[in-house]
Image: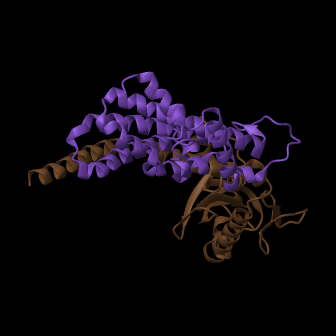
Amino acid sequence: MSNMKDIYTAGVWEDNPVFRQMLGLCITLAITNKVVNGVTMGVAVFFVLTASAFIVSLLGESVPRRVRIPVYMLVIATFVTLVYMFLKAFFMPLSQALGAYVGLIITNCIILGRLESFSSDNSPWDSIVDAAGVATGFALALIAMSVVRELLGFGTLFGVQVLGSGWTQWVSMILAPGGFLVLGLLIWVQRSISPVEEG
Amino acid sequence: MKKEVWMVTILVLVATVSAGVLGFVNVTTRPIIKRNEVRKLRESVLESVKVQYESENLEDKFESEIRTNEIDGKEFYLRYNDEGELTEVAFEMVGSGFQGPISAIISLKPDLETIVGLEILDQQETPGLGARITEKEFRRQFNGKVVRPELLVVTDAGDAQNKVDAITGATRTSKAVQGIINDSVREVRTNILTEKVMERLSHE
């Protein structure tokens, strides 16, 4: 695993965290009814994931196996809290829109999964590329979901009316059932384009 | 034995660095967050009593238009006209929404029944559904409505003096707003701004 491009694109597409690994679904279902929420969450997770991957890969072998999870959690929680305070101070409306979900990034298993399976025994540079790839994949999944849901649910994109005013809003798209429906459809689409190789 | 010592050492080290970084960022962002909250409160109070302001003159407008008065441990924002007569009373209301606490500013005429304006300070309702209580179209309906015998947020409000339209698909949030307004207004009317207190406040 030394080819940067392969590491990156694997995270974005072949091993997409949402559509392939089925991770981070709680956040994915909860916040994707508006595109702006999806973008903000994508950016926040990108920052937390790449930053913690860098720190964890620096710590590397010096972390004893038995305390690695607490150490990872501490690193992740630190960066998440940073994001939380930053949003509250400089992007108050966005932090209000995302509510508790920013704090919940700490428990996002995409992040813990990457730290455990990649960053802990790879070089800092490789880890950042891997984290960036997976985070991009996550952000794209969130945006894809929220584009479909906001468009059908509100007839808008980024809050701007796209479909005519005669559009009947699909209220269920904004609610949880719409999230499950769109997630299922998008997983089907992604896996049709590049089928899973049965090992 | 050595292994255990190292385990504890690394945990303590990581935790110390983490605490240091967070402490530093907290100290630097706290004043900004606090300022944001105060600004938001003042904006909402001014909006609720329908005073025009620009973001540059918010502080001045607030100082010149609003008199803050603490009564029984609750902050009231009072507005007087040029003759020194009380025209609006605004205060903060807090209550449970569907998913979390909702806090809002309501302003009333001195009869403590007629609503002048409603502003939402903070809420955690479903985006696109319950969260639409922050939208102008919803809040504007309350202007001029009367909390007597009580305010009702219903499916088809018509022209009734004490009814406003609920948000489609967000019945629980709509009912929560109804409850918060009725409870807070009743509480203020009967226990804090009694007739005696209002008499004292009615002139500057």
Question: Where, quadrant-wise, is the N terminus of chain B in this rendering?
Answer: bottom left
Q: Position of residue B23 (x, y in %)?
A: 32, 46
Question: Residue B168 sits in which quadrant?
Answer: bottom right
Horizontal arrangement in the rendering, residue B59 relative to residue A34 (left or right): left
Q: Position of residue B157 (x, y in %)?
A: 87, 63
Horizontal arrangement in the rendering, residue B164 relative to residue B158 (left or right): left
- In the displayed orientation, state which residue is furthest to the front: A199
Seen in the picture, residue B147 relative to B9 is either above or below; the reply is below
* Residue shown at the point (69%, 62%) measured from the top left: B173
Look at the image and give the colour of chain A.
Answer: purple
Residue B80 visible in image = no
Seen in the picture, residue A141 relative to B155 is either above or below; the reply is above
* Residue shown at the point (75%, 38%) measured from the top left: A156
Question: Residue A167 sits in which quadrant?
Answer: top right
- In the displayed orientation, state which residue is furthest to the left: B1
Residue B182 visible in image = yes
Q: Position of residue B38 (x, y in %)?
A: 53, 49
Choose between B61 and A82: the one closer to the eye.
Answer: A82
Choose between B190 and A33: the one closer to the eye.
Answer: A33
* Residue shown at the point (71%, 38%) measured from the top left: A159
Q: Position of residue A2 (x, y in %)?
A: 36, 24
Choose between B92 and A162: the one closer to the eye.
Answer: A162
Horizontal arrangement in the rendering, residue B28 relative to residue A23 (left or right): left
Look at the image and give the colour of chain B.
Answer: brown
Question: Where, quadrant-wise, is the C terminus of chain B in this rendering?
Answer: bottom right
